[in-house]
Amino acid sequence: MWRTAGWLCLPALVVACGAGFPTGKTVFDENCAVCHGTGGLGDGPFADKFLSVPPDLTVLTRNNGGEFPTLYVTNIIEGHGRGDHFSGAMPEFAVTLEGKAFRIEPLVDYIESLQK
């Protein structure tokens, strides 16, 4: 009986464990949309304030041979592997969001969901 009760509680435990973290969309809306726009097109209200336009995040898969570049996107958000082509306007969110209840995977998943 206790085994059955434990299995019945498992879904609630899984939900509760993720309850403290914002969704990927929430993190995007609060941190990325101001430059990249709510749809990820690079047309946010601050987009015209920079020397280079924020990239259109909806074409990452298309520009990567049909495969979403998960590791690349994760590294860019965290501030790693930024080459000379990178304008430097985007903050390193691993530092910016340090100490906050934040997981990068939901944000990367949300950006993947924006793909056309």
Image: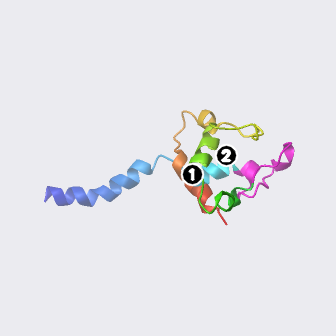
Residue type at numbered disc 2: Asn
Residue type at numbered disc 1: Thr
- Give the camera-side residue of 40 and 1: 40
Residue at 44% x, 50% y: name it.
18
- Give the camera-side residue of 63 and 47: 63
CA neighbours of label 1 inside 10 A, class few (<14), some (14 to 19), many (20+): some
Reply yes or no: does residue 14 show up in magenta: no
Mark 1 — residue?
70
Q: Separation of disc 2 and disc 1 at Cα? A: 19 Å
Segment colored magenta: 33-55
Q: Position of residue 24 (x, y in %)?
A: 57, 53
- Left or right: residue 61 compared with residue 19: right
Asked if residue 39 can be seen in this view, the reply is: no
Residue 31, numbered circle: 2
Q: Position of residue 30 (x, y in %)?
A: 66, 48
Per the picture, the main secondary structure of the magenta-coloured stretch is loop
